[in-house]
Image (tube, rainbow, N blue to C red):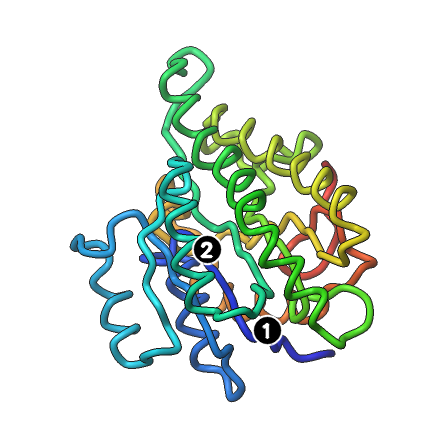
Amino acid sequence: MGDLNPRSVLVTGSNRGIGLELVKQLVGKSNPPEWIFATCRDPEGPRAKDLKNLAAQHQPRVQIIQLDVSDPSSIKAAAAMITECLNGAGLNLLVNNAGVVKESNLESETPEQMLEVYNTNVIGPTMMSQVFLPLLKKASQECTLKGMSCSKAAIVNMSSDCGSIANVLAWDIGQIPSYRCSKAALNMLTRCQSLQYAEDKILCIALHPGWLQTDMGNAAIMAPTTVEDGVQEILKRLAQLSEKETGTFVNWDGKTLPW
């Protein structure tokens, strides 16, 4: 198995759950990235306290950047700051992790709520990939590694088996139609990105991280896997991905999931 060795990583939704744990485990590697851009909507708020404490221990490697993925102007402002930090280098790994779920069923779903979920879970990753594409292309061009990998240039969209039309994970626990539809749309976005960016050697993947014990994961009942163990497996999987997997929907253990 190859090592995950990107020079620079951007993780959205880094103030808690999977995003925070990704930052924690990446910076704890024996060969950590030179730059870890940990973004969240409100870096000064109480929910970012753990992230701020982590970043304070790992300056200047961990940089907290204000970024609301549902706000295009916020994305552009963050990109300007990150471009300046990279000082001419590219961005190797973009992890579109930020996501929201709203408790609902088919009878109670509202247009406003559905739009809110789509703005974060689908439009956000779309805009992120557009705005950061020049930095991803630059990373791919300057990297000497063959083929595609998450150490070279990659977009990882955190999806969910709840968005699999074939599996419809945990329907009996919660219908959450806006969330399910948004993740199905995110999977299609990933496929489109893989086709568009193939010539640029940018790997694009939709990843189901597993059912983890996060605030979102524990919303209905206790999830079976700790976030620490889950993120360990995610990082192992990212290290193994290549051009063979680009444009696919994969489970945390590497198995291909049905769309």
Q: Is residue 191 left or right of residue 212?
A: right
Q: Quadrant of residue 81?
A: bottom left
How packed mark 1 is, by other alpha carbons closer than 10 Å (few <14, some 14-19, many 20 or more), is: many
The amino acid type of the residue labelled 2 equals: Leu
Q: Quadrant of residue 160?
A: top right
How packed mark 2 is, by other alpha carbons closer than 10 Å (few <14, some 14-19, many 20 or more), is: many
Tell me the quadrant of the picture where the N terminus can be found.
Answer: bottom right
Q: Secondary structure at mark 2?
A: loop
- Badge 2 is on which residue? 212
**Residue 96 position (above or below residue 231):** above
**Residue 28 position (above or below residue 230):** below
Residue at image position (29%, 73%) is 54
Q: Is residue 2 left or right of residue 174?
A: right
- Residue 135 horizontal/vertical position (percent): 58, 58
The amino acid type of the residue labelled 1 equals: Pro
Q: Is residue 10 left or right of residue 241?
A: left
Residue at image position (51%, 77%) is 33
- Badge 1 is on which residue? 6
Q: Which mark is residue 32?
A: none
Q: How many marks?
A: 2
